[in-house]
Amino acid sequence: MGGCDSVKSVIVYQRTGGACNMVAGRDVWWHEVANGQSEQCEPEWVEAEHPLFLLYTSGSTGKPKGVQHSSGGYLLHAVLTTKWTFDLKPDDIFWCTADIGWVTGHTYITYGPLACGATEVMFEGVPSYPDGGRFWKMIQDHKVNIFYTAPTAIRALIKMAETNEAVHPRQYDLSSLRLLGTVGEPINPEAWMWYHEVIGGGRCPIVDTFWQTETGGHMITPLPGATPTVPGSCTLPFPGIQAAIVDETGHDVEWGKGGFLVVKKPWPSMIRTIWGDPDRFKKSYYPADLGGTLYLAGDGAVRDAQTGYFTIIGRIDDVLNVSGHRMGTMEIESALVSCTELVAEAAVVGRPDETTGEAICAFVVLKRSRPTGEEAKKIANELRNWVAKEIGPIAKPKDIRFGDNLPKTRSGKIMRRLLRALAKGEEITQDVSTLENPAILDQLKGK
């Protein structure tokens, strides 16, 4: 079991019929164990704070942490957010496309929808197989009403649709949809508009949900029909969530000014501890610099000066300092992706620079084949000028590298720590076990 000597028994489900190395005395087949069992199963009654599950996170940022969630609080928030954020009706067909091993799959495939008695689609494939129309065909065939997916998937599907008319969403009947959602990272306004107009036909509200493995469920999100939406903003906190933006000392900042996203009061599904490391739990999420009582999300954010709407501008360590100018990587990424004729996806990181302190390095996926040589230099220069026009000359990336795709976890998150290492020219010595496409690292080295 690869070091898991405490595991004494393993139940194996026969999914494909392929060869399986079964160990006598330890491994048993599911169908043999289940045969003859009663259809009734009395639940194990536990206290509300009894641990429900451990989920290891930070595959995209560093050493994994075992996030511990409780039985009562986690389930309560999973049910409430499933009902309210998705405006769930008894006859709805709900589809969350996440990997079931990711927290989104836990909360919005397993626990939330099933606890609400929802009818849902469960999916174990990828959006590009057998072709880029897979999601749209699923929606058409199963009459999906609520569709919840990641901005990364949306941007990849835009590229597929715009390069192959046969898999464009207009080839499918998506009229059953009434609500769309996004999860996993901020969605840039251009992708939001495509999602709204092309997939939702301009009629479906989009719930842009901000939350984390540690929070257990939605924290900041529109409520459909109640919250006017704005492309790129996750709008306002879910009822009962006291989110705020503070400075380095833990004091509130004015609306319109950026700072650290925090939560001021406890909520039902909050992380209870990091398994086996309570000190790391306190230092990571309740830092003494902020007074020790504020939950630090680890994201930078800003509230609109008029509406108070929240916009996530990236991880705290994704803020770049170029010649004394502080910029969020999300801002530069959005500028690149707004060049809709060329760019499908972009990820921006910083690397040390003797002149400017930090230099901007952009990894870009185009809506066409990856350019090389002089053509790559020409397009890189076009994109630098585009960013200068959108933001200002200070934001022009010093280094632009092109790839067929970006390094992502199997749940679709871009692994920025690997991109930082590539930008600095370092060898990849970190754990890449959660990486979906390891071969892309060589392509992005820029040599």
Image (cartoon, grey):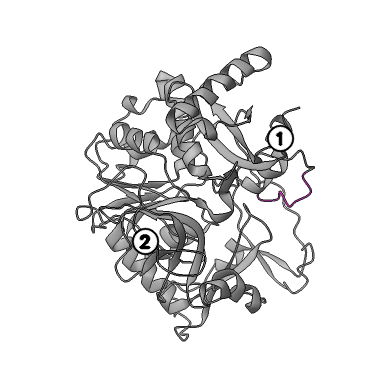
Q: Residue at coordinates 77% horizontally, 44% vertically from top-left?
A: 428
Vertical position of residue 25 compared to residue 163: above or below: below
Where's residue 414, x and y in %? Answer: 58, 44
First in residue order: circle 1 vs circle 2 = 2
Q: Nearer the viewer, mark 1 or mark 2?
A: 1
Which of the numbered marks, if any, corresponds to residue 246? none
Q: Residue at coordinates 43% horizontally, 30% vertically from top-left?
A: 390
Q: Is residue 209 visible?
A: no
**Most foreground residue, 397 or 268:** 397
Question: Label 2, on which residue?
Answer: 113
Q: Is residue 412 visible?
A: yes
Which of the numbered marks, if any, corresponds to residue 439? 1
Rendering quarter of residue 75: bottom left
**Label 2: few (<14), some (14–19) or many (≥20) C-alpha neighbours in 10 Å:** many
Q: Residue at coordinates 69% horizontally, 15% vertically from top-left?
A: 373
Where's residue 176, x and y in %? Answer: 25, 40
Query: Main SS type for the magenta part?
Result: loop
Q: Amino acid at mark 1?
A: Ala
Quadrant where the image shows the N terminus? bottom right
Q: Is residue 345 left or right of residue 111?
A: right
**Most foreground residue, 201 or 317:** 317
**Most foreground residue, 413 or 71:** 413
Q: Residue at coordinates 19% horizontally, 52% vertically from top-left?
A: 225
Q: Is residue 229 left or right of residue 310?
A: left
Q: Residue furthest top?
A: 374
Vertical position of residue 55 compared to residue 166: above or below: below
Range covered by the magenta-colored residues: 428-434
Where's residue 231, x and y in %? Answer: 33, 42
Which element type, helix, strand or loop, lies under badge 1?
Answer: loop
| CB-based contact (under 8 Å), mark 1 and mark 2 | no
Q: Amino acid at mark 2?
A: Pro
